[in-house]
Image: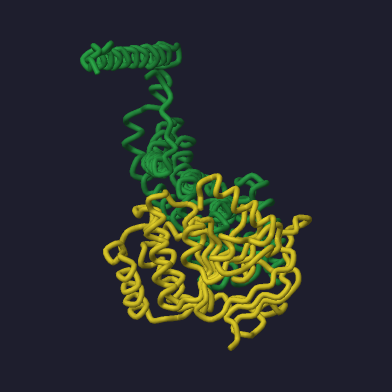
Chain colours: A green, B yellow
Amino acid sequence: MSAVPALTTREDRQRARRRRAIRSGLIATASTVIVIGGLATFVLTSPGWPSVHRFFLNGHWFNVSFSSVLSGFWLDVRMFLICEVGALILGLVIALIRTVRVPALLPVRIVAVVYVDVMRGIPTLLWVYLVGFGVPTLNLSGLPTSPIVLGEIALGMCYAAYVSEVLRAGIQSVHPSQGAAALALGLTPAQALRHVIVPQGVRRVIPPLLNDFIALQKDVALVSIIGPQEAFRVAQIFAAQYFNYTPLLAAAALYLCVTIPMTRLTDYLQGRSLRERGAVLALGPR
Amino acid sequence: MTAVLELRGVTKAYAANQVLRGIDLVVGEHEAIALIGASGSGKSTLLRCIDLLEEIDDGDILLDGEPITVPGLDPVPIRRRLGLVFQAYNLFPHMRVIDNVILGARRAQKMAEDDARAAGQAMLERFGLGDRGQDYPDRLSGGQQQRVAIARALLARPRALLLDEVTSALDPELVGEVLELIRELKAEGMTMLIATHEMTFARDFADQICFLAGGRIIERGPPAQMFTAPAEVETQRFLARLLAANRV
């Protein structure tokens, strides 16, 4: 066969690719500068900016309040850690009850369905309020009366409902052939769940579970309405006392310190599981 | 001598879809029977019914002369006496190969961890997979995964091995290694019931061929007779179609 001269050389392609990369970089930089710069100018030149700076971004009040807000935030951390563990355990129990079709469990299943419907259907704030003031009113010995504990219970109950739905979706997404293979080996249905179905189901829903935990980590602020002096509450008291809102921004920064790393972790895990399934499709100019 | 497996008039329907319409079949000790027939003829369903993964509607299935399809009987201990290998391997993707192989021994047979590991490792070595125990299944080729699945089913020393189209999901060049393994098991005297599309293999390997169509066994006999002089028109047509598709 005679050699046919190539229509496009390797060098041509490389040059074209380089040109495309430079152009994309320029466009990205320019659009970032225009949008961010425009927004910043808009805010900084607004007539009220000097008072915003004084009331919300005041260095003096930040320094004065920070240590108290921080100690309030430790209470937040303690509360959401306890809530997360509780919600995970209760959520898994509910998910299993709703998955397993055993006649004897029917009443429990009905309770679980109603529980999830109610907990997802009422505002979390309202439930915290009801538990926080309702349980002590029952006046039963043995029930906790500490608002911190009651707040943790209320929040954990709400999030258990969300967590159970995520877990249930994961468990149900495991292909029936996995269960069949486990049963064929002579495992009991319970063993098949424990060793084959649940581990695979939970693994698949770790990103959405972490998503729920991010929401929980900031929703602990809701507990403040029944008394506990966590970060938001402490900041609010400061703001009311000294008529300066900088402590609230300090509290916001502290919440972000835990939620943003968690968000990045979730994104990372989600991206990884997508890549594992080969499902990443890059959209954009080639 | 009682048969290892005996099926008497087994029927099974999914809603209005009558999949098995009265299957009679006897699998003797050390015997290998190949089930052939088009997709949807009921081969897989039959194997799933025998392993009690599906409940039959009528008839009886006997294992070592003892009925196993009596209503109310706990299927779990019976499944432990049978081995089933699936078309799509169905390995557990979250477990290492060795843990896949020994899960049944550990949890169903309650074998001690160390004993199970030793037995599992020996089984893998025998199948030429001794160095893959610590890998996850998705690191293995299809043929290797299917050999792991067979090892997993064999570790419990089943009375009979049920193989459901175990080479259908494999790339053509990987089929040989799995068939070779099944030949070895046959030489060792394993009792087997095999649903297969590999006619050449069925011909020189099985003691008896059963041709299924429409949920019935249309014709059965030794391979020599079935492949050269089938009596039934339907069998002739099926084999002619395969011949035309170059599969015999």
Q: B122 or A281, which lies in front?
A: B122
Residue A55 % position (x, y)? 42, 26
Residue B126 % position (x, y)? 32, 71
A79 in relation to A276, above or below: below
Q: Can residue A83 be seen from the camera position used here?
A: no
> What is the total number of numbered labels drawn onto the structure image?
0
The furthest residue to the bottom? B1
Q: Residue at x 42, y 12 (%)?
A: A42
Q: Can residue B53 be seen from the camera position used here?
A: yes
Q: Residue at x 69, y 60 (%)?
A: B232
- Tell me the quadrant of the picture where the N terminus of chain B can be found: bottom right
Residue B155 % position (x, y)? 42, 75
Q: A5 or A132, which lies in front?
A: A5
A20 in relation to B39, above or below: above
A175 in relation to A40, above or below: below
Left/right of residue A27 with respect to residue B37 in the rendered view: left
The furthest residue to the right? B16
The furthest residue to the front? B229
Left/right of residue B155 with respect to residue B53 in the rendered view: left
Residue B116 % position (x, y)? 37, 77
B118 in relation to A48, above or below: below
> Residue A150's image quarter?
bottom right
Left/right of residue A37 with respect to residue B228 in the rendered view: left
> Residue A66's image quarter?
top left
Left/right of residue B48 with respect to residue A148 in the rendered view: right
